Image (spheres, rainbow, N blue to C red):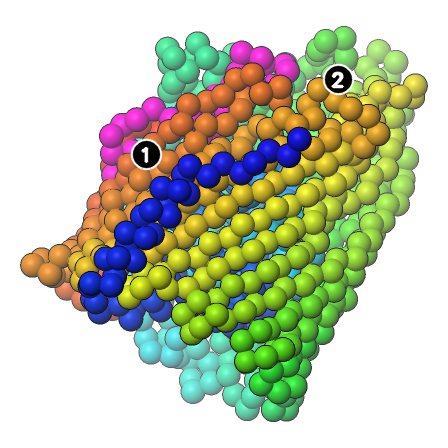
């Protein structure tokens, strides 16, 4: 039986909206900047080129560069959690566990971009990808397109596209130097400088270093990042060259048992056998892209973006305490994004595109400890995995926008994507012995390929200059990554998989309820099919299959209200119903109809910003983050408690150049959880506690 959407939260929000509308009818502050900030911002994620958010026929949430700067975030969740239906949980160091319309996920269901270019390859998804972005080093704003991507987006854009924009070079000289410090030995240093090289060239360099000892044992981390940009503009050409480099090193604390959570929440949760010095998650990231744009005529613009990317990462399997192997992975990519923008007239335009990617991916997993026997399986000292995958992807697409009338606009898109995997295993039975066999299935060389046709359609109707509604359908997909296909235990049999797909239906609204009050709202329903189901028994051994259906539906609201010249209210809320429609494609399951784990509901973020006239230069913000409960187990027998956090941010401008700020996170020192689950191997539950009240302060100087 289909579950109804839960509406009590939004009944309350509707009451708030109506009361604010009544307030607006009798109050008329200077609200032009509030309206511009809310809906008239320029976005690029849906088309790869600039368009006004108010007119977009997709749900896009934005965070401005100014708001990002004010947050002084040392972890990206401090900023993105202000968006309706977006919830990032901190896993470790700079690594996040995101939830956008779907449960908190560690799979390749989100496409991460930096300045419109993918941060990683679909062949090997790493949920640390967002830590490679320049969101905290060069905050030029963020956009999250919710639901499957448009025709310009490929695999991994299953549930959302996250696009981080770095600051563009400017011709007028400007430099920012900032330093912040805080509890747990927090250190955050930034340098950002930009200026003209000559009349046609400008450059920007942003450098940052962050480190934190963490409030729990074995949670220290540090990150160094460089974002360098070069802009060339002349004779109809615009070239944006962007170099990005990131290096981070994070210790890896584990989840806690209920007893440890109660008695010693600062403990690292690692077994005694784990070598703390080697329990690390490390990565080095390099990417160079060049967006080349040329107006070929009044109606035709060519945009080509070649890029190269290298990711070198390693981490310890701390969740396997008896063996603690270390996995190393190297990903080398050469890619190209090419688009032809055809602006036929004021009411008709077309995008023709072709995306291509060549990636060499190599993975090794090595156990340095002596041979161990765990649950009857021998894990010998030495290499367990050593393989390469050559990944090739080619994707042509078309997206056409047509004004059907003065108020009605239609967008149609179609993308075809084909990917090839060429797998080579560098280990064989000769590398093992009868006494110390391979703990993994030794696959032969093989090739896999995946193809998908992705239709998109949306209608946008301008009710008036202040109200716009849109209706959207989109199909998204994600291909299996290397771990789904090639990391198989010795008890498994070889198998093949198909991509997981999702069908999304959405109704949205953007507009102004009154003077100084803007609202964006969306109702959506998404049906995912062909998700990967593991542990299916066959005579040859256990395999994974594509199976069943999962349903995601919800309501999202974003409200911004200029209450007075001094007060601004921003509210973001979402309620969801994420459930298993059918666990398997061909048989019933006790899990059919159950709510998916790690699906907090509802999620509400409220921010009240205050800029008093009597103390010019002071800005303060009080933030409330409410996270609803979620199920710990697939059988839905245990749930977490709902949680509330209160955060305070304040800054004072001594001069136009010198700023001082303070920030207190978890002001009331509440206990809360970052992650919580009760898998079959730990039915009593495993928990990652959130940090207690934490203070930090900073100084920044602009010249």
Q: Does any portion of residue 291 appear in the rendered image?
A: no
- Spatial separation of the CA atoms under disc 1 and disc 2: 47 Å
Up-down: is 639 above or below 14? above
Q: Quadrant of residue 616?
A: bottom left
Could you say where residue 685 lies in the image, as x and y percent from the top left?
53, 16
Residue in the picture at 29% in, 43% down: 623
Q: Within 10 angstroms of label 2, few (less than 14), some, or many (20 or more) residues?
A: many
Residue in the picture at 65% in, 50% down: 504
Could you say where residue 168 lies in the image, as x and y percent from the top left?
44, 70
Which residue position holds label 2?
380
Magenta stretch holds residue 672: yes
Could you say where residue 102 lies in the image, as x and y percent from the top left?
58, 40
The local secondary structure at tag 2 comes to loop
Q: Does any portion of residue 165 appear in the rendered image?
A: yes
Between residue 702 and residue 403, name the one nearer to us.
403
Between residue 12 and residue 314, name the one nearer to us.
12
Residue in the picture at 78% in, 29% down: 584
Magenta stretch holds residue 522: no
Up-down: is 551 above or below 598? below
The magenta span reads 663-690
Residue in the picture at 87% in, 33% down: 495
Sequence-wise, which precedes: disc 1 or disc 2? 2
- 524 to the left or right of 675: right
Question: Label for residue 645?
Answer: 1
Up-down: is 254 above or below 605? above
The local secondary structure at tag 1 comes to strand
Give the total of numbered labels.
2
Q: Quadrant of the C terminus?
A: bottom left
- 22 to the left or right of 85: left
Could you say where residue 166 lies in the image, as x and y percent from the top left?
46, 62
Which label lies toward us, 1 or 2? 1
């Amino acid at each position: 039986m289909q579950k109804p959407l839960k509406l009590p939260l939004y009944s309350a929000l509707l009451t708030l909206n109506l009361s604010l509308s009544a307030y607006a009818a009798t109050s008329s502050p200077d609200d032009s900047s509030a309206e511009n900030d809310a809906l008239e911002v320029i976005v690029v994620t849906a088309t790869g080129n600039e368009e006004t958010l108010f007119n977009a026929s997709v749900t896009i949430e934005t965070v401005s560069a100014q708001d990002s700067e004010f947050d002084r975030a040392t972890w990206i969740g401090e900023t993105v959690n202000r968006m309706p239906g977006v919830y990032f949980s901190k896993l470790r160091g700079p690594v996040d566990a995101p939830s956008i319309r779907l449960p908190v996920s560690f799979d390749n269901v989100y496409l991460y971009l930096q300045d419109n270019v993918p941060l990683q390859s679909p062949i090997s998804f790493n949920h640390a990808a967002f830590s490679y972005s320049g969101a905290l080093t060069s905050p030029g704003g963020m956009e999250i397109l919710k639901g499957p991507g448009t025709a310009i987006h490929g695999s991994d854009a299953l549930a959302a596209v996250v696009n981080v924009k770095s600051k563009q070079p400017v011709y007028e000289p400007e430099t920012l130097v900032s330093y912040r410090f805080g509890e747990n030995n927090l250190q955050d240093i930034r340098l950002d400088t930009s200026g003209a090289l000559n009349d046609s060239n400008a450059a920007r360099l942003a450098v940052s270093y962050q480190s934190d000892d963490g409030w729990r044992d074995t949670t220290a981390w540090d990150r160094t990042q460089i974002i360098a940009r070069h802009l060339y503009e002349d004779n109809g050409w615009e070239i944006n060259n962007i170099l990005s480099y990131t290096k981070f090193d994070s210790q890896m604390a584990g989840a806690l048992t209920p007893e440890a959570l109660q008695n010693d929440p600062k403990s690292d949760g690692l077994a005694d056998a784990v070598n703390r010095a080697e329990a690390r998650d490390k990565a080095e990231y390099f990417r160079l892209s060049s967006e080349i744009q040329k107006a070929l005529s009044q109606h035709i613009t060519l945009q080509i973006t070649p890029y190269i990317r290298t990711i070198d990462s390693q981490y310890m399997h701390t969740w396997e305490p008896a063996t603690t192997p270390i996995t190393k992975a190297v990903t080398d990519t050469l890619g190209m994004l090419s688009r032809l923008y055809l602006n036929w007239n004021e009411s008709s335009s077309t995008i023709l595109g072709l995306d291509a990617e060549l990636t060499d991916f190599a993975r090794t997993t090595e156990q340095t400890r002596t041979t161990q026997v765990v649950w009857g399986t021998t894990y010998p000292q030495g290499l367990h995995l050593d393989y390469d995958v050559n990944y090739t992807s080619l994707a042509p697409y078309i997206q056409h926008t047509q004004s059907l009338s003065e108020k009605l606009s239609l967008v149609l898109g179609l993308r075809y994507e084909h990917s090839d995997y060429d797998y080579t295993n560098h280990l064989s039975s000769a590398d093992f012995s009868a006494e110390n066999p391979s703990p993994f299935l030794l696959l032969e060389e093989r090739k896999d390929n995946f193809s998908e046709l992705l239709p998109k359609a949306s209608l946008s109707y301008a009710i008036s200059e202040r109200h716009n509604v849109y209706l959207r359908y989109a199909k998204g997909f994600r291909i299996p990554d290397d771990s789904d296909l090639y990391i198989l235990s010795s008890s498994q049999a070889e198998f093949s998989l198909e991509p997981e797909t999702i069908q999304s239906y959405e109704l949205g609204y953007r507009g102004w309820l009154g003077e100084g009050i803007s609202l964006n709202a969306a109702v959506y329903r998404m049906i995912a099919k062909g998700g990967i189901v593991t542990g299916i028994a066959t005579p040859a051994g256990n395999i994974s299959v594509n199976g069943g259906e999962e349903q995601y539906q919800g309501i999202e609201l974003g409200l911004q209200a200029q209450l007075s010249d001094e007060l601004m209210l921003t509210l973001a809320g979402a309620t969801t119903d994420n459930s298993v429609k059918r666990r398997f494609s061909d048989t019933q399951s006790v899990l059919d109809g159950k709510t998916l784990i790690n699906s907090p509901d509802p999620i509400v973020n409220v921010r009240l910003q205050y800029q008093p006239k009597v103390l010019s230069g002071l800005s303060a913000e009080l933030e409330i983050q409410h996270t609803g409960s979620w199920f710990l187990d697939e059988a839905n027998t245990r749930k977490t408690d709902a949680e509330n956090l209160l955060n305070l941010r304040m800054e004072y401008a001594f001069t136009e150049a010198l700023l001082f700020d303070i920030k207190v996170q978890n002001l009331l020192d509440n206990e809360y959880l970052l992650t919580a689950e009760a898998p079959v191997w730990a039915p009593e539950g495993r928990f990652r506690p959130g940090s207690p009240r934490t203070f930090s302060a900073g100084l920044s100087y602009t010249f």
